[in-house]
Image (spheres, rainbow, N blue to C red):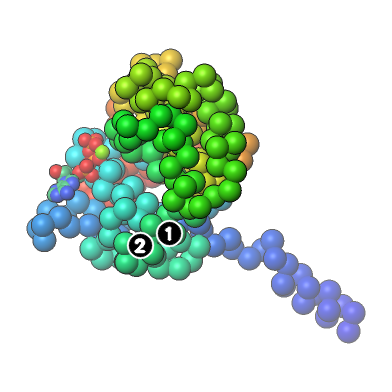
Amino acid sequence: MRGLAFRVSILHDPTEVAAIPILELRDVTKTYDGQTEVLHGVTLAVEPGDAILISGENGSGKTTLLNVAGLLDVPTKGQVLVDGKDAGRLKEAARANVRLRTIGFMFQDHNLIEDLTTLQNVMLPMRLARAKKREEAARNLLEMFGLGKFADRKPMELSTGQRQLAAVARALANGPRVVLADEPTASLDAANAALVIEALRGANLERGVAVVFAYHDSEIRWPGARRRRLQDGVLAPV
Ligand SMILES: Nc1ncnc2c1ncn2[C@@H]1O[C@H](COP(=O)(O)OP(=O)(O)OP(=O)(O)O)[C@@H](O)[C@H]1O
Ligand SMILES: [Mg+2]
Protein backbone atom coordinates (compact mmCIF):
# COMPACT_ATOMS: atom_id res chain seq x y z
CA MET A 1 0.00 0.00 0.00
CA ARG A 2 2.78 2.32 0.92
CA GLY A 3 4.46 1.74 -2.42
CA LEU A 4 1.22 2.49 -4.23
CA ALA A 5 0.68 5.71 -2.30
CA PHE A 6 4.23 6.73 -3.19
CA ARG A 7 3.64 6.05 -6.87
CA VAL A 8 0.35 7.91 -6.84
CA SER A 9 2.01 10.92 -5.23
CA ILE A 10 4.67 10.89 -7.93
CA LEU A 11 1.99 10.75 -10.62
CA HIS A 12 0.43 13.83 -9.05
CA ASP A 13 3.64 15.76 -8.66
CA PRO A 14 2.43 19.32 -9.37
CA THR A 15 5.77 20.27 -10.89
CA GLU A 16 5.08 17.80 -13.68
CA VAL A 17 1.81 19.45 -14.65
CA ALA A 18 2.33 21.68 -17.68
CA ALA A 19 1.96 25.35 -16.71
CA ILE A 20 -0.96 27.19 -18.25
CA PRO A 21 0.47 29.98 -20.41
CA ILE A 22 -0.34 33.52 -19.26
CA LEU A 23 -1.21 34.40 -22.82
CA GLU A 24 -1.82 32.12 -25.74
CA LEU A 25 -2.71 32.72 -29.36
CA ARG A 26 -4.27 29.73 -31.10
CA ASP A 27 -4.43 29.78 -34.86
CA VAL A 28 -5.20 33.50 -34.91
CA THR A 29 -6.26 35.08 -38.17
CA LYS A 30 -6.75 38.80 -38.66
CA THR A 31 -8.37 40.31 -41.70
CA TYR A 32 -8.91 44.03 -42.18
CA ASP A 33 -11.86 45.31 -44.22
CA GLY A 34 -12.97 41.76 -44.87
CA GLN A 35 -10.21 41.30 -47.43
CA THR A 36 -6.61 42.02 -46.37
CA GLU A 37 -5.60 38.99 -44.30
CA VAL A 38 -2.58 40.08 -42.27
CA LEU A 39 -2.28 37.12 -39.88
CA HIS A 40 -2.88 33.69 -41.39
CA GLY A 41 -2.91 31.43 -38.36
CA VAL A 42 -0.56 32.57 -35.62
CA THR A 43 0.06 30.30 -32.66
CA LEU A 44 2.13 31.45 -29.70
CA ALA A 45 2.22 30.56 -26.01
CA VAL A 46 3.71 33.01 -23.52
CA GLU A 47 4.68 31.47 -20.20
CA PRO A 48 5.88 33.15 -17.00
CA GLY A 49 9.43 34.42 -17.39
CA ASP A 50 9.47 34.06 -21.19
CA ALA A 51 11.32 36.54 -23.37
CA ILE A 52 10.14 36.30 -26.97
CA LEU A 53 11.58 38.46 -29.73
CA ILE A 54 9.49 38.78 -32.89
CA SER A 55 11.13 40.24 -35.96
CA GLY A 56 9.39 41.14 -39.19
CA GLU A 57 9.58 43.62 -42.03
CA ASN A 58 7.51 46.80 -42.18
CA GLY A 59 3.91 45.83 -42.78
CA SER A 60 4.43 42.18 -41.83
CA GLY A 61 1.79 42.45 -39.10
CA LYS A 62 3.77 42.90 -35.85
CA THR A 63 1.52 45.68 -34.54
CA THR A 64 -1.57 43.75 -35.61
CA LEU A 65 -0.31 40.68 -33.76
CA LEU A 66 0.52 42.58 -30.55
CA ASN A 67 -2.77 44.49 -30.64
CA VAL A 68 -4.71 41.23 -30.86
CA ALA A 69 -2.50 39.58 -28.21
CA GLY A 70 -2.92 42.65 -25.98
CA LEU A 71 -6.73 42.56 -26.31
CA LEU A 72 -6.69 45.98 -27.99
CA ASP A 73 -8.15 44.43 -31.13
CA VAL A 74 -10.16 41.28 -31.78
CA PRO A 75 -9.06 38.31 -33.89
CA THR A 76 -11.07 37.47 -37.02
CA LYS A 77 -10.66 33.75 -36.30
CA GLY A 78 -8.84 31.76 -33.65
CA GLN A 79 -8.50 32.33 -29.94
CA VAL A 80 -6.61 34.57 -27.55
CA LEU A 81 -6.48 32.94 -24.14
CA VAL A 82 -5.45 34.63 -20.92
CA ASP A 83 -4.74 32.18 -18.10
CA GLY A 84 -6.40 29.49 -20.21
CA LYS A 85 -9.65 31.42 -20.75
CA ASP A 86 -10.75 32.76 -24.11
CA ALA A 87 -10.59 36.54 -23.72
CA GLY A 88 -10.08 37.60 -27.33
CA ARG A 89 -13.70 38.31 -28.13
CA LEU A 90 -14.97 39.58 -24.81
CA LYS A 91 -16.71 42.94 -24.90
CA GLU A 92 -14.41 45.97 -24.90
CA ALA A 93 -14.87 46.75 -21.18
CA ALA A 94 -14.20 43.15 -20.15
CA ARG A 95 -11.12 43.00 -22.36
CA ALA A 96 -9.89 46.26 -20.81
CA ASN A 97 -10.29 44.71 -17.37
CA VAL A 98 -8.28 41.61 -18.23
CA ARG A 99 -5.67 43.82 -19.89
CA LEU A 100 -5.31 46.07 -16.84
CA ARG A 101 -4.74 43.08 -14.55
CA THR A 102 -2.43 41.08 -16.78
CA ILE A 103 -0.80 42.96 -19.63
CA GLY A 104 1.46 45.99 -19.95
CA PHE A 105 1.59 47.49 -23.41
CA MET A 106 4.36 49.57 -25.00
CA PHE A 107 3.10 51.21 -28.16
CA GLN A 108 5.21 51.74 -31.25
CA ASP A 109 5.03 55.53 -30.76
CA HIS A 110 5.13 55.43 -26.92
CA ASN A 111 1.60 56.93 -26.73
CA LEU A 112 2.28 58.96 -23.60
CA ILE A 113 -0.45 61.52 -22.99
CA GLU A 114 1.03 64.94 -23.75
CA ASP A 115 -1.12 66.85 -21.25
CA LEU A 116 -0.09 64.67 -18.34
CA THR A 117 3.24 64.76 -16.53
CA THR A 118 5.55 61.74 -16.61
CA LEU A 119 4.35 60.80 -13.13
CA GLN A 120 0.68 61.13 -14.12
CA ASN A 121 1.27 59.05 -17.24
CA VAL A 122 2.75 56.23 -15.17
CA MET A 123 -0.07 56.53 -12.65
CA LEU A 124 -2.79 56.40 -15.29
CA PRO A 125 -3.11 52.59 -15.61
CA MET A 126 -3.00 52.41 -11.79
CA ARG A 127 -5.86 54.91 -11.60
CA LEU A 128 -7.89 52.87 -14.08
CA ALA A 129 -7.22 49.74 -12.00
CA ARG A 130 -8.01 51.68 -8.78
CA ALA A 131 -4.64 50.60 -7.39
CA LYS A 132 -3.64 51.77 -3.91
CA LYS A 133 -0.56 53.88 -3.09
CA ARG A 134 -0.16 54.66 -6.76
CA GLU A 135 1.93 57.81 -6.45
CA GLU A 136 4.50 56.01 -4.32
CA ALA A 137 4.57 53.05 -6.72
CA ALA A 138 4.83 55.32 -9.77
CA ARG A 139 7.68 57.32 -8.22
CA ASN A 140 9.51 54.07 -7.45
CA LEU A 141 9.17 52.99 -11.07
CA LEU A 142 10.44 56.35 -12.31
CA GLU A 143 13.43 56.11 -9.96
CA MET A 144 14.15 52.62 -11.23
CA PHE A 145 14.50 53.98 -14.77
CA GLY A 146 16.46 57.10 -13.81
CA LEU A 147 13.49 59.41 -14.39
CA GLY A 148 12.88 60.45 -10.78
CA LYS A 149 13.80 64.07 -11.39
CA PHE A 150 11.63 64.28 -14.50
CA ALA A 151 8.43 63.24 -12.73
CA ASP A 152 6.78 66.64 -13.21
CA ARG A 153 7.79 67.17 -16.82
CA LYS A 154 5.44 66.65 -19.73
CA PRO A 155 6.46 64.09 -22.40
CA MET A 156 7.46 66.92 -24.80
CA GLU A 157 10.05 68.03 -22.24
CA LEU A 158 11.75 64.62 -22.21
CA SER A 159 14.28 63.22 -24.67
CA THR A 160 13.12 60.50 -27.06
CA GLY A 161 14.92 57.86 -25.00
CA GLN A 162 13.48 59.19 -21.74
CA ARG A 163 9.99 59.03 -23.25
CA GLN A 164 10.47 55.37 -24.14
CA LEU A 165 11.77 54.66 -20.62
CA ALA A 166 8.67 56.39 -19.24
CA ALA A 167 6.63 54.11 -21.50
CA VAL A 168 8.45 51.08 -20.00
CA ALA A 169 7.59 52.40 -16.51
CA ARG A 170 3.94 52.86 -17.50
CA ALA A 171 3.79 49.37 -19.03
CA LEU A 172 4.98 47.96 -15.67
CA ALA A 173 2.64 50.15 -13.62
CA ASN A 174 0.06 47.55 -12.60
CA GLY A 175 2.57 44.75 -12.07
CA PRO A 176 1.66 42.98 -15.32
CA ARG A 177 2.70 39.38 -15.83
CA VAL A 178 3.41 40.03 -19.48
CA VAL A 179 4.64 43.13 -21.32
CA LEU A 180 3.99 43.47 -25.03
CA ALA A 181 6.49 45.89 -26.54
CA ASP A 182 5.91 47.10 -30.10
CA GLU A 183 9.25 48.25 -31.53
CA PRO A 184 10.05 50.37 -28.48
CA THR A 185 13.60 51.00 -29.68
CA ALA A 186 12.84 51.81 -33.32
CA SER A 187 13.36 55.56 -32.99
CA LEU A 188 16.24 55.43 -30.53
CA ASP A 189 20.00 55.66 -30.94
CA ALA A 190 22.08 52.66 -29.91
CA ALA A 191 22.72 53.90 -26.35
CA ASN A 192 19.06 54.65 -25.61
CA ALA A 193 17.93 51.44 -27.30
CA ALA A 194 20.29 49.53 -25.00
CA LEU A 195 18.79 51.32 -21.97
CA VAL A 196 15.25 50.36 -22.94
CA ILE A 197 16.25 46.75 -23.62
CA GLU A 198 18.09 46.57 -20.29
CA ALA A 199 14.99 47.95 -18.55
CA LEU A 200 12.81 45.25 -20.11
CA ARG A 201 15.41 42.53 -19.48
CA GLY A 202 15.61 43.66 -15.86
CA ALA A 203 11.83 43.32 -15.48
CA ASN A 204 12.07 39.89 -17.12
CA LEU A 205 15.00 38.57 -15.10
CA GLU A 206 14.36 40.19 -11.74
CA ARG A 207 10.56 40.18 -11.60
CA GLY A 208 9.83 37.27 -13.93
CA VAL A 209 7.71 39.48 -16.20
CA ALA A 210 7.22 37.76 -19.55
CA VAL A 211 8.17 40.04 -22.45
CA VAL A 212 7.12 39.84 -26.08
CA PHE A 213 9.19 42.29 -28.06
CA ALA A 214 8.62 43.17 -31.72
CA TYR A 215 11.30 44.80 -33.87
CA HIS A 216 12.16 45.07 -37.51
CA ASP A 217 15.65 46.09 -38.39
CA SER A 218 18.47 46.33 -35.88
CA GLU A 219 19.80 43.23 -34.16
CA ILE A 220 18.51 43.00 -30.59
CA ARG A 221 20.96 41.63 -28.04
CA TRP A 222 18.97 39.52 -25.62
CA PRO A 223 20.74 36.30 -24.63
CA GLY A 224 18.36 33.47 -23.85
CA ALA A 225 15.35 34.97 -25.66
CA ARG A 226 13.17 32.81 -27.93
CA ARG A 227 13.24 34.26 -31.42
CA ARG A 228 10.49 34.15 -34.01
CA ARG A 229 10.02 35.79 -37.38
CA LEU A 230 6.66 37.03 -38.64
CA GLN A 231 6.55 36.36 -42.34
CA ASP A 232 3.65 35.78 -44.72
CA GLY A 233 1.28 36.08 -41.78
CA VAL A 234 2.73 33.23 -39.72
CA LEU A 235 5.35 32.95 -36.98
CA ALA A 236 8.39 30.85 -37.80
CA PRO A 237 11.32 29.96 -35.51
CA VAL A 238 14.51 31.83 -36.40
N1 LIG B 1 -6.66 49.41 -39.26
C1 LIG B 1 -6.24 48.88 -40.41
N2 LIG B 1 -7.04 48.78 -41.48
C2 LIG B 1 -6.61 48.20 -42.63
N3 LIG B 1 -5.39 47.70 -42.84
C3 LIG B 1 -4.52 47.80 -41.79
C4 LIG B 1 -4.90 48.39 -40.54
N4 LIG B 1 -3.84 48.32 -39.69
C5 LIG B 1 -2.84 47.73 -40.39
N5 LIG B 1 -3.26 47.42 -41.64
C6 LIG B 1 -2.47 46.74 -42.66
O1 LIG B 1 -2.00 45.52 -42.13
C7 LIG B 1 -0.66 45.24 -42.54
C8 LIG B 1 0.21 45.01 -41.30
O2 LIG B 1 0.30 46.24 -40.56
P1 LIG B 1 1.03 46.30 -39.18
O3 LIG B 1 0.93 47.70 -38.70
O4 LIG B 1 0.50 45.25 -38.31
O5 LIG B 1 2.52 45.91 -39.61
P2 LIG B 1 3.89 46.10 -38.80
O6 LIG B 1 4.68 44.84 -38.99
O7 LIG B 1 3.61 46.53 -37.43
O8 LIG B 1 4.59 47.26 -39.63
P3 LIG B 1 5.68 48.35 -39.12
O9 LIG B 1 6.99 47.64 -39.02
O10 LIG B 1 5.66 49.37 -40.20
O11 LIG B 1 5.19 48.91 -37.81
C9 LIG B 1 -0.22 46.43 -43.38
O12 LIG B 1 -0.34 46.05 -44.75
C10 LIG B 1 -1.21 47.51 -43.03
O13 LIG B 1 -1.46 48.36 -44.13
MG1 LIG C 1 4.14 48.18 -36.33
Residue 88 appears anywhere in the view: no
Q: Is mark 2 in CB contact (under 8 Å) with mark 1?
A: yes
Ligand 2, seen in the image, is in the quarter at: top left
Mark 1, residue position: 97
Q: Few, some or many C-alpha atoms within 10 Å of disc 2 (few <14, some 14-19, many ≥20)? A: few
Real-space CA distance between mark 2 and mark 1, rounded to the nearest whole angstrom: 6 Å
Please state which amino acid type lies under the numbered disc 2.
Ala
| Residue nearest the observer in this picture, 92 or 209 | 92
Q: Position of residue 212 (x, y in %)?
A: 43, 43
Q: Position of residue 200 (x, y in %)?
A: 50, 33
Where residue 20 sits, quadrant-wise, is bottom right
Q: Position of residue 120 (x, y in %)?
A: 44, 35
Q: Residue drawn at (42%, 18%), measured in percent from left and top?
A: 192
Q: Residue drawn at (59%, 36%), measured in percent from left and top?
A: 136
| Residue nearest the observer in this picture, 167 or 7 | 167
Please state which amino acid type lies under the numbered disc 1.
Asn
Label 2 CB less than 8 angstroms from ligand 1: no
